[in-house]
Image: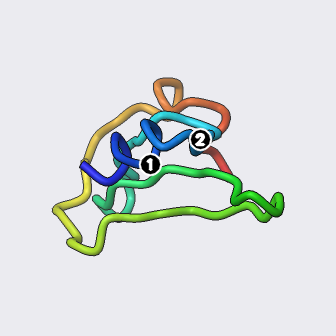
Amino acid sequence: KTYEELKAAGIEFSNEPYRNRHTGRGNVRLRDPDGWRLQMCDGQRKEPEKGIPESEVKDEFKR
């Protein structure tokens, strides 16, 4: 809900929300009006996903 509200208010996001496969948390990246890069993440940790082939992980999320 927060993502949709902020997007409707004109906040520009760097990506769509996604679930971090290692932590199980939802994440999304954005910039504030001053240009600072921010990351919002879900406060509730969920069970991490297992068995996802590395080839299926988007390059932008690899570190």
Tell me the number on the disc at residue 13.
2
Q: Furthest residue to the left?
A: 47
Name the spot of residue 42 as percent of width and height, x first: 31, 65
Tag 1 or tag 2, which sits nearer the N-term? 1
Mark number displayed over residue 6: 1
Seen as rendered, the residue at the extreme front is 9
Residue at x 57%, y 62% (from the top left corner)? 39
Q: Do the residues labelled 2 and 1 touch (CB within 8 Å)?
A: yes
Q: Is residue 24 above or below residue 51?
A: below
Q: Nearer the viewer, residue 33 or 17?
A: 33
40 shown above or below 6 = below
Q: Nearer the viewer, residue 49 or 46?
A: 46
Q: Residue at x 73, y 61 (%)?
A: 37
User: What distance separates the C-alpha of mark 2 from that of mark 1?
Assistant: 9 Å
> Along the line of sight, which residue is nearer the eye, 41 or 35?
35
Mark 2: which amino acid?
A: Phe
| Amino acid of disc 1 | Leu
Could you say where residue 19 lies in the image, as x and y percent from the top left?
34, 47
